[in-house]
Amino acid sequence: MTTPQQWCRRVAALVVTAALSGCATTQGNGAASSADPFEPFNRAMYAIHEPIDDNIVRPMAQAWVDYVPSPVRHAVRTFFGNIEDGFSALNGLLQGKWEKAGNDLGRITVNVWGLGLIDIATEAGIPKGDEDFGQTFGHWGIPQGPFLFIPLWGPTTVRDGTGQLLRFVWSPTNEIPNVALRNVIYGLGAVDLRAQALGATSLLEQASLDPYTFVRRAYLQRRQYEVYDGAPPPEKDDE
């Protein structure tokens, strides 16, 4: 059984790997090759992902939207949103973003009155901080490392993937002793998360002759935007 100390050591090793990988890949000649040195492998993973998503995951997400009552869907989304607010508050504190951290803590406090299943905070106009470990690592100056595409996970980078692993390991959902119940809760969260991206899937199909390149560019640009709070430094080509 893996102890918390072992997890911490593994996570630390992943963070170091992210830094070293990022330093190595910044020496590429072109933007695409520098950010995506494993493109052939990633494209193969994307090719595996597409039919699984098209034939299994997306239909499940569409059925979730079509047949599950809206109050139930919103309750599931709010439940997981409260967990995300907790992690966002932690990352806001780690980055010194006190206002965002305060807003996230305020959202959690307010939503307690809705038993964690009614999003009172949004109705009250309290904004989400939307900070995560990947953004914290970027704020600390750790390079993003290579782009990766993982079937059923989606696009990520070494830095963001490390943050997502931290998020998973420390999730309070893992503390639920009943394995079956825990898996059902994780499944509901995954289906609802995919349902939120149904509109983006339609956009992807209409917008690009090469969906993989579109996904990579959109993901990397969005993450750059989020790490720098909407004011990323100009790219070398732009300069």
Image: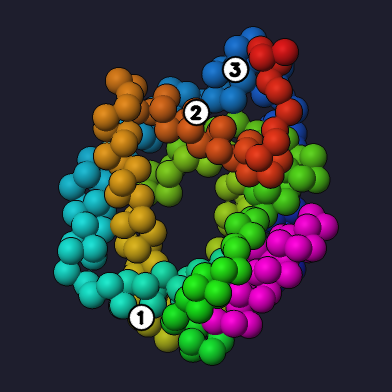
Q: Does residue 33 appear anywhere in the picture?
A: yes
When asked about the image quadrant of residue 210, the answer is top left
Q: On the picture, is 124 further left or further right than 234?
A: left
Q: Is residue 8 visible?
A: no
Q: Nearer the viewer, mark 1 or mark 2?
A: 2
Front residue (pair 238, 160) = 238
Bounds of the magenta span? 85-111
Please, is residue 101 above or below residue 156 in the view? below
Q: CA distance from mark 2 to mark 3?
A: 10 Å
Please give the residue where the numbered disc 2 appears in the rendered image: 217
Q: Position of residue 34 (x, y in %)?
A: 61, 20
Three-letter code for the amino acid on which mark 3 is drawn? Ala
Marks 3 and 1, Cα distance to the nearest angstrom? 45 Å
Magenta span has 95?
Answer: yes
Residue projecting furthest to the top: 29
Q: Position of residue 201 (x, y in %)?
A: 30, 41
Q: Quadrant of the C terminus?
A: top right
Residue toward you, 183 or 99: 99
